[in-house]
Structure formats: structure tokens, C-alpha cells
Amino acid sequence: MGSGLRSQVSGLRDPIVDSLRGLGIILIVVGHVIIWLNRSGVIFPNDILIKDYVYSFHVPLLFIVSGFVHGIKDRFNDGKGYFFHAKKSFVDIYLPYLLFSYLGWFTSIIFFSPSSNPINFNAANYSEFFRIPYIGFREYWYLCTLFEIKLVHTALECRLKSRIPIIIFWVLIFLLINYVNQNIFSLPVYVFRFSRGIYFCAGYVMKKFNLISRDRNPGVLLGIILFIAGTLCFFAPVHNLFISTLTTSSICLGLFSLFYALEVKNKFLVSCGVISMVIYIVHDYVIFSLTLIYRFTGFLSSTPLIADLLCLILAVLVPHLVVKIYRNVKFLHWVEYTFYPGKLLLKK
């Protein structure tokens, strides 16, 4: 996911950030496993509650990590200009999004058309073909939205030359979009998603103002307090924009504080963080394949916990296998460029 899910800055990788990124991508997989298995009829008693809790912060966490990594570079005075950075984001993020979105769309059209799919399971329609470039296809919407947010944020960096107006811009966008959506009319989903820029900006501010780093972190106790406070907000009887934002912000900042205070560098999480673009793209196909098996054969439907765990494990491990194969099988090296086209087109 470009600078969103993997550091693009050679030599500046931070294993703590990779661990956070790894946790974020695993939580994404958890949420998708629950949703897809419920669609296939495999329902674990606490699935919905777990899904709602994970969904309250997992995507904002990735946007914060995106902004944090984005903040590593100084675009005010690098002399490269807006279009250089825009092209980089286009190649790193948008090209993989388009490639795998259309691949997913064609797969759905070919194998799950209404004529061959009477139960309408995962059916696609032809109008989606034209919406993919801007609306986001199914679970890949994050990449599309991240690309759009980075374009705007980078333009602000290159034009304003100051960080304070950038912060004000994203706060106003967040408030305006949510106000219109709640009080005037429902905005299209791809417009509403743009309000997630506030979390990207939060990560950017954390990095630029050095609010959290190895040498400077809020501490374990504050991290625990923030995480617990956010979790309690999630279970609050009344939910509004303030409570939802407080829930998300508290949990995400609590996780950042804990990871940096404890210097979490778990090898598995780091591994997931490093190849998170591959996990994000491939896991969807793994989960989809397993849900088809569950749906049409009833396999493991009587043991939903095992079905959930099996799907989660495979959805995380298969992408690792894909990476291992294209790294070690010479004639498959080109596969890496489908996930990271910047390594070819930008000569990384």
C-alpha cells in the first residue's frame, strides 16, 4: 500500500512501525474473515461483536500508520515537485489497486454470473466496471482512498509550506463531511471515506512533531489507559460522532504508545508489516475461495470457531507463501512487480 502499508524510504524502516502495520493488516483480515464466513452461513456466536469492535479502529489505524510513514520525508524543500510525488503514489498504490480490482471483478463476472449463480453469491454487475477507478472495488477500497488522500495531502504540502493549515484543512473536511452526511443528506460512500484523511493527518503530525518515537513516547501506562478508554467508549450505550471518534483515536493512540514504549518488534508482526501489500491483496482471494467451499459443501459449518481460525491462518500464511515463491523461483520474479510496480517503473 505504498507508504501506507510499507515504508518506501530505503534504509529508514522502523521495526516498531512494521509491527504496528502487521497488527493492522491482521485485524483487516480478521474483519473480512468474519464478514465473508457469515455470508457463507458459518456464524460464530460472538462474531458480530468482534467484527464491530475490530472495525471501530482497524482501518483508521492503517491510515495513521500511512500518515506516520508519509511524514518520514520532507516534501516542503526536496525540490522534486508535486507531480513527482503524485506519480510515485500512482505507481505504488493506484496501479496495484486497479490491477487486482479488475481481476476480482472479472473473476466475479465469469464465475458468478446470475445464470450460473442462482443464490447470487458474490455476484458482480457490469456497472461496477466503470466505478472501479474512483469508488473502490469491494475490500480494495482502502487503496483507492489512500491514493486520493495522499494526492490531496501532498498537494497541500507542496503549496502551503506549513503544517498548521494542513491540519486545519483535514479537521474541517472531517467535520464538514460528517455534518453533511448526518444532517443534510447521505453522501456517496467514496466521498464519506475521504473523511478518513483526518487519521492520515494524525499519523503525519505524530511523526513530524516527533510526538511518538523510540526516544520519546507517552509510556506504557498512558498507552494502557488510552486503549481501555477507547474500548469502554465502544461499549457506550449511545454512539455519535464524538464517541466514535474518541473510540477510534484512543485505541489507535494507545496501540502506538504501547508499541513504542514496549519497543514491540515481534518477528511475525514485522514480517506481516513488510509484506502487508501482498497480504492485503491476496487474503481476499483466499477468504473468498474458502467461503465458497464452506457455502457449497457445508464443510466445518458445525464448527464455526475452527472454520474462522482456519480461514484466518490461511489468509495470512498464503501471502507469505506467495512471497517466498516469487522470491525463490526465478521465472516468477515478475510477480513481485504486480504488487510493487514501483520497483520496476520507478527503478527501486
Image (cartoon, rainbow, N blue to C red):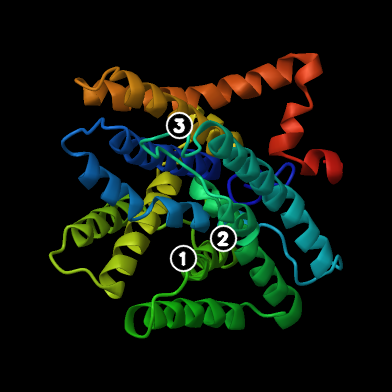
Residue sitting nearer the eye, 123 or 337: 123
Residue sitting nearer the eye, 337 or 202: 337
Spatial CA span between label 2 and label 3: 21 Å
Q: Amino acid at mark 1?
A: Val
Mark 2, residue position: 135
What is the quadrant of the C terminus in the image?
A: top right
Name the N-terminal-most of marks 3 and 1.
1
Counting from the top left corner in percent of width and height, residue 318 is at 52, 22
**Is residue 32 visible in the rendered structure shown here?**
yes
Spatial CA span between label 3 and label 1: 23 Å
Q: Amino acid at mark 3?
A: Phe
Bin the neighbour count of mark 3 within 10 Å (Cα to Cα): few under 14, some 14-19, many 20 and up.
Answer: some
Mark 3, residue position: 288
Residue sitting nearer the eye, 44 or 260: 44
Q: Which numbered tag is attached to residue 189?
A: 1
User: Which residue lies most toward the front here?
Assistant: 115
Q: Amino acid at mark 2?
A: Ile
* Badge 2 element: helix
Spatial CA span between label 1 and label 2: 8 Å
> Relative to residue 240, is residue 215 drawn left or right?
right
> Relative to residue 283, is residue 290 drawn left or right?
left
Name the N-terminal-most of marks 2 and 3.
2
Q: Residue at x 40, y 83 (%)?
A: 180
Counting from the top left corner in percent of width and height, residue 195 is at 48, 70
* Badge 1 element: helix
Name the N-terminal-most of marks 1 and 2.
2
Q: Which numbered tag is attached to residue 328?
A: none
Bin the neighbour count of mark 2 within 10 Å (Cα to Cα): few under 14, some 14-19, many 20 and up.
Answer: some
Q: Residue at x 42, y 45 (%)?
A: 259
* Badge 3 element: helix
Circles 1 and 2: CB atoms closer than 8 Å: yes
Bin the neighbour count of mark 1 within 10 Å (Cα to Cα): few under 14, some 14-19, many 20 and up.
Answer: few
